[in-house]
Image (spheres, rainbow, N blue to C red):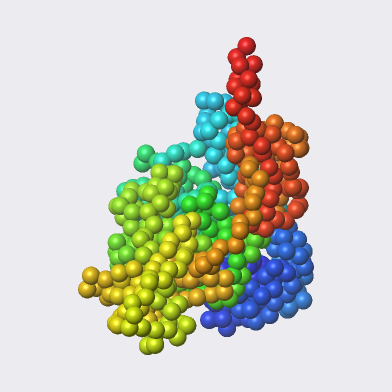
Amino acid sequence: MISKVLVANRGEIACRVFRTCAELGVRTVAVHSDADAGALHTRTADEAVRLPGTSPADTYLRGDLIVEAALAAGADAVHPGYGFLSENPDFARQVLDAGLVWIGPPPEAIEAMASKTRAKELMGLEPLREVTAADLPVLVKAAAGGGGRGMRVVRRLEDLDAELTAARAEALSAFGDGEVFVEPYVEGGRHVEVQVLADTHGTVWALGTRDCSLQRRHQKVLEEAPAPGLPPALRDELHRSAVRAARAVEYVGAGTVEFLVSGGRAHFLEMNTRLQVEHPVTEEVFGIDLVALQLRIAEGGALEPEPPAPRGHAVEARLYAEDPARGWAPQTGLLHRIAFPGAAGVRVDTGFADGDRIGVHYDPLLAKVVAHAPTRAEAVRKLAGALERAAVHGPVTNRDLLVASLRHEEFAAGRMDTGFYDRHLAELTGAAADPLAPLAAALAAAAAGRGRFGGGWRNVPSQPQTRRYRVGEAEHEVSYRWTRRGLAADAAGVVHAGPELVVLETGGVRRRFEVARYDGGQVFVNGVALTELPRFPEPETRREPGSLLAPMPGTVVRVADGLAVGSAVTEGQPLLWLEAMKMEHRVTAPVCGTLTALHAAPGRQVEVGALLAVVQQASPEAEGSADHEESQ
């Protein structure tokens, strides 16, 4: 029997495995980088072992250090979680060679399927060896790992070499393996997968389907089980193909076989030889604990001949610290509060707690929120409501996008595909709610906090007072006046005002607003983020025209070949690449012109807003002259 498990991972998945281990009476060991010394997974485990350093390459990708940690802590088993080394056969062998139990498939099965190129060959498929214009669009894909890292869609042949280079660098950083391949890119398809579970006695379960079509940067955002609207014959074909793939490599443990469904046909994508991020929707539908079953299988236990019957529908939303309206840019900073009040029966898997800091080194996933109900419509409504009422106070998140996506008519009808955000992102992020009521509530709470209520009214009418707030990129001014009945803020009557709760009445309707204030003028009113601005703003630091500022904190991973001060650049030309939270972000020239300053160098860490480079725009006369010369 397993008595102590080390989880070779971090964040949400480590906390999730620890939870099941605690329920089973199994002791737990965490490993952590220096950046994660105070992280929730480190605090949750019974014991923790430091991995010196901050980058994944120095810590969570060091299998030798992790095995040493397991032995030092007296663990008898290792659970890999997902990502990092979870699909690395050499790491699995290191664990087994050390005499530890590996809670995962045999290294040979990982080796056969963890490389997407070899997996396709096993299934009788071949990647593209030579790419021509007739093959476009194509998808550049990392052979190892997952999570959308190391993936690029290429629509122009001249972009292929640059995207191959970028994908290799990103894959090497995330998985320690820079191998990439090219395959046809199927547009308008649905991403459907099958959860499999196999024991050492020859039993293989196919635990239904999941739809994971709503993705950004090829990384899933919303997932659900079962996949809606699949014809029974296609669903059965998916189950058979998944079981066949598992049996082909004598698979053991939990795994996922992924397909792209288009035109009524299923195209094999890959097999993930690990637990998936979206495994909770399958657990909710089948009423099982996949981690507990992983441990049972690792101990040699047998599965029942048939899996339990599914019931109802489950939907999962991934809550990220990112700004969808700004190219999904990851966000960092202090997470003041994360709570889901009134979300009875909604499951929340998270690696963060109130007061934790979101750093630059790892994936910006804050939590997975899962709703289960008898029908799909009920589950979707339940999840949207829980997210809408959530208190997520800190950096910008994708919470509003998730709510809008769940309530979009295309998603509600089950007609989504992998191009959903390509078509709808602008409308989903552009319709901001009217901030007037939250602004009035923030103003009333601020006045209550200063003790103005009950003694502020004067018989002589006063001029309206004003305060300024920023909501997103827009600045708003709200006015208020003291009357015989108390405070009136921009035509909203204040029925009750306290520092944390305000009740406003407008048009005979009363609404409650919960208000939270933090240092730096941050205010959150019913989920709306405001920033209180000073009455007399400080002069802004002037920046030279054409200044390129870091859109996020991160590390400069490379600069374009040959780029130097004095180089001529064209609009949209990639100048440098930043890595933040395991994703690469390209910084391009805003205009045609000349590079007059370059402050970025590979390896340099930068904060958000740091000056990276300056591009001086070419004069219209110069551009016209260049055009004329080219036409000669």
Quarter of image, res 252: bottom right
Can you name the residue that lies furthest to the left here?
A: 508
Q: How far across and down, in percent of the image, does residue 161 sit? A: 65, 33
Q: How far across and down, in percent of the image, does residue 504 sit? A: 31, 75
**Which quarter of the rendering shows the C terminus?**
top right
**Front one among 152 and 329:** 329
**Which quarter of the rendering shows the N terminus?**
bottom right
Question: On screen, 124 above or below 396?
Answer: above
Q: Residue at x 41, y 71 (%)?
A: 465
Question: On screen, 87 above or below 508?
Answer: above
Q: Residue at x 64, y 55 (%)?
A: 541
Q: Residue at x 60, y 66 (%)?
A: 333
**Front one among 460 and 235:** 460
Question: On screen, 334 above or below 587?
Answer: below
**Left or right position of 320 against 313:** right
**Front one among 176 and 202:** 176
Query: Is residue 398 at all visible to an observer of this figure?
Result: no
Quarter of image, res 391: bottom left
Can you name the residue that lies furthest to the front here?
A: 460
Query: Is residue 357 at all visible to an observer of this figure?
Result: yes
Q: Residue at x 32, y 50 (%)?
A: 410
**Left or right position of 2 against 339:** right
Q: How far across and down, in percent of the image, does residue 298 sit? A: 60, 69
Can you name the residue that lies furthest to the top here?
A: 632
Question: On screen, 301 above or below 380?
Answer: below
**Left or right position of 233 against 123:** left
